[in-house]
């Protein structure tokens, strides 16, 4: 009993630790400018106002940056699934030389600091003429999201019995047809979750986006450059607007994030 | 429908030789069971015939067609898997219709055929359900219906009943037998359950260590095992094996077991192995009866329809199936007389039957 209470208390503490700042940000985003700098601070939404939000979206460049973010995130999503799903399928279904090493290598790419990559990448992108384009940012974001996409789809495909595919083959399917008619429908919910996760990774990423763009900023990169000069309430609203989609998405796909580490959540 | 012919089929996984030059012929409309312990290669052979595994060497024919290299979908086979492999995202109806739809069959033709296949397995009332709403037995019925619906040349079954509980297995076994007798589809059925093999097969191919050690009708496999392995694997309790010393008296060879002498076939070696089924031993109370040997009863197990005795003779254990009302106590000595026409002699070294 005692240990149970300890766990509950710990969980509450951690939840508070994570949620409280988000709450403050949300509170500030929906208050007017005067309220934000008022002291002592009120922790209850007393003066609900959309003034700050509407001001935020009125600022020049916010909509363009948001659009850029969406474009980059969608591209990242498509690339990571397009590359990650076949890789995951190969890992789940075939034995090949260096399979374990390959899996480790996928994880190791996450250990490689992107800061070191930034300068060579910038130079190479300038040479290729894709610097300051959403495409270039999406490439880097794909590199970040791909390990997750591969490992999640690996465990997804592993969870679909091979016999289902074999049964489809014996009933007249080619490999591709069996994949389309049997494997895909079963993997689809998990695949959607993986895609959303890739989207969130891209949406939240700030460093590569800031280094690789000048005019065509994504929202994160745009806010980063604006934060220094912007008033407090602007920062709060920007922060809130970045957090919300991620929160919603992550909440929607949380079940599949466990499966990435092989923890069954059934 | 068509027969199946495997010629010198060999399969190597890395350094492990799963199949050593298998030759097997299944006649048109025949029900053949591949029987053997796990790891004997029976499933590998089935998967090679299905086209799910590639042979290292040898030829496979279905009907007159050499099917080497043909993908599973071109072999006109259907397969039933051990874990049913019912598609979970489709209704039972769509599962059974799957093979027909792949043949681009028109809807008005699919419907009656699915209905017929479902009727055969008594699952007409489940057609709208999904796999998750079915019990294991019902899923296996769906899998069998799905295989039969395409009216395959050859039906391949990989331990289809082994995931069912004992009672259900008994029921499904009888049903399968009736069904396949009617449809006369050429069938290869893989199992490690000797009772299943005996009850279903037209012919049993007993496999061991990547080889077929005997291929014959069930009663022959039971009564005249080719090797001691077959005798020991089939039958419950298995065949008894007793080693006899060969003695020569007046130029004639006799086998010696303890104090008893037993007539033996012509041999050059000095040891012989006698194989005798537990039910082919007659228990006689009078000592020294002709043709019998004395042995000590160690355990008596009353099983209802019969008594099972565990006895010892000449330091060797054997099991005897005795009538249920026999008066026998552990520790007593009885005379066991084997039925002379049911004796099976084996070479003591190789374990092969002497003919």
Image: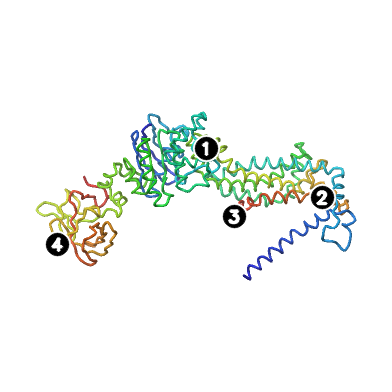
In the image, is residue B215 above or below residue A35?
Answer: above
Precedes in sequence: disc 3 or disc 2: 2
Above or below residue A77? Residue B64 is above
Indicate which label's residue lies in the foreground, 4 or 2. Answer: 4
Q: Nearer the viewer, residue B160 or B353?
A: B160
Task: Give the chain letter at badge 2.
Answer: A
The residue identified by callout 1 is B94
Query: Which of the 4 image quarters holds residue A78?
Result: top right
Distance between mark 2 and mark 1 Cα atoms = 51 Å
> Mark 1 or mark 4, which is nearer to you?
1
State the residue at coordinates (23%, 64%): B297
Q: Earlier in the sequence, mark 1 or mark 4?
A: 1
Which quadrant is home to the C terminus of chain B? top left
Q: Nearer the viewer, residue A224 or A71?
A: A71
User: Horizontal and vertical percent for residue A133?
Assistant: 77, 39
Residue where numbered disc 2 is placed: A238
Do marks 3 and 1 share a chain?
Answer: no
Q: Which residue is mark 4?
A: B286
């Amino acid at each position: 009993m005692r240990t149970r209470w300890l766990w509950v208390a710990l969980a509450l503490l951690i939840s508070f630790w994570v949620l409280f700042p988000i709450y403050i940000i949300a509170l500030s985003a929906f208050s007017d400018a005067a309220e934000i700098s008022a002291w002592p601070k009120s922790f209850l939404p007393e003066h609900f106002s959309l003034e700050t939000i509407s001001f935020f979206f009125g600022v020049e460049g916010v909509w363009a940056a948001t659009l850029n973010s969406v474009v980059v995130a969608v591209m990242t999503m498509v690339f990571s699934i397009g590359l990650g799903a076949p890789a995951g399928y190969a890992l789940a279904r075939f034995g090949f030389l260096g399979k374990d090493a390959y899996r480790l290598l996928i994880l190791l790419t996450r250990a490689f600091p992107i800061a070191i990559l930034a300068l060579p990448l910038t130079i190479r992108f300038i040479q290729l003429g894709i610097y300051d384009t959403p495409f270039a940012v999406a490439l880097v974001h794909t590199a970040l999201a791909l390990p997750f996409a591969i490992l999640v789809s690996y465990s997804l495909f592993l969870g679909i019995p091979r016999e289902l595919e074999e049964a489809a083959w014996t009933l007249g399917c080619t490999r591709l047809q069996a994949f389309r008619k049997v494997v895909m429908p079963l993997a689809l919910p998990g695949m959607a979750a993986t895609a959303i996760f890739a989207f969130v990774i891209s949406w939240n990423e700030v460093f590569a986006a800031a280094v690789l763009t000048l005019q065509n900023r994504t929202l994160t990169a745009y806010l980063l450059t604006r934060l220094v000069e912007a008033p407090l309430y602007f920062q709060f609203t920007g922060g809130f607007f970045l957090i919300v989609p991620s929160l919603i998405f992550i909440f929607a796909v949380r079940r599949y994030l466990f499966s990435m580490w092989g923890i069954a959540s059934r | 429908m068509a027969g199946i012919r495997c010629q010198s089929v060999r399969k190597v996984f890395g350094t492990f030789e799963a199949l050593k030059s298998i030759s097997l012929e299944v006649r048109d409309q025949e029900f053949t069971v591949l029987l053997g312990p796990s790891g004997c290669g029976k499933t590998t052979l089935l998967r090679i015939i299905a086209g799910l595994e590639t042979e290292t060497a040898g030829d496979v024919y279905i009907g007159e067609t050499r099917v080497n290299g043909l993908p599973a979908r071109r072999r006109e086979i259907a397969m039933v898997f051990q874990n049913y492999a019912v598609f979970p995202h489709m209704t039972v109806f769509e599962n059974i219709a799957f093979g027909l739809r792949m043949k681009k069959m028109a809807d008005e033709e699919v419907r009656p055929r699915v209905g017929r296949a479902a009727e055969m397995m008594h699952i007409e009332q489940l057609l709208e359900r999904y796999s998750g709403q079915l019990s294991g037995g019902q899923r296996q019925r769906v899998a069998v219906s799905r295989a039969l619906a395409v009216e395959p040349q050859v039906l391949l079954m990989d331990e289809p009943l082994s995931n069912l509980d004992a009672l259900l297995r008994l029921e499904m076994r009888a049903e399968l037998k009736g069904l396949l007798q009617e449809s006369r589809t050429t069938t290869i059925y893989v199992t490690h359950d000797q009772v299943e093999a005996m009850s279903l097969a037209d012919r049993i191919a007993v496999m061991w260590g990547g080889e077929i050690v005997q291929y014959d009708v069930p009663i022959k496999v039971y009564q005249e095992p080719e090797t001691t392995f077959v005798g020991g694997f089939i039958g419950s309790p298995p065949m008894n094996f007793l080693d006899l010393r060969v003695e020569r008296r007046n130029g004639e060879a006799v086998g010696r077991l303890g104090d008893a002498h037993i007539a033996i076939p012509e041999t050059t070696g000095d040891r012989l192995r006698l194989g005798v089924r537990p039910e082919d031993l007659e228990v006689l109370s009078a000592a020294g009866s002709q043709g019998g040997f004395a042995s000590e009863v160690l355990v008596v197990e009353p099983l209802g329809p019969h008594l099972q005795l565990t006895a010892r003779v000449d330091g060797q254990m054997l099991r005897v199936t005795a009538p249920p009302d026999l008066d026998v106590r552990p520790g007593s000595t009885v005379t066991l007389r084997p039925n002379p026409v049911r004796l099976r002699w084996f070479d003591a070294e190789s374990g092969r039957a002497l003919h």
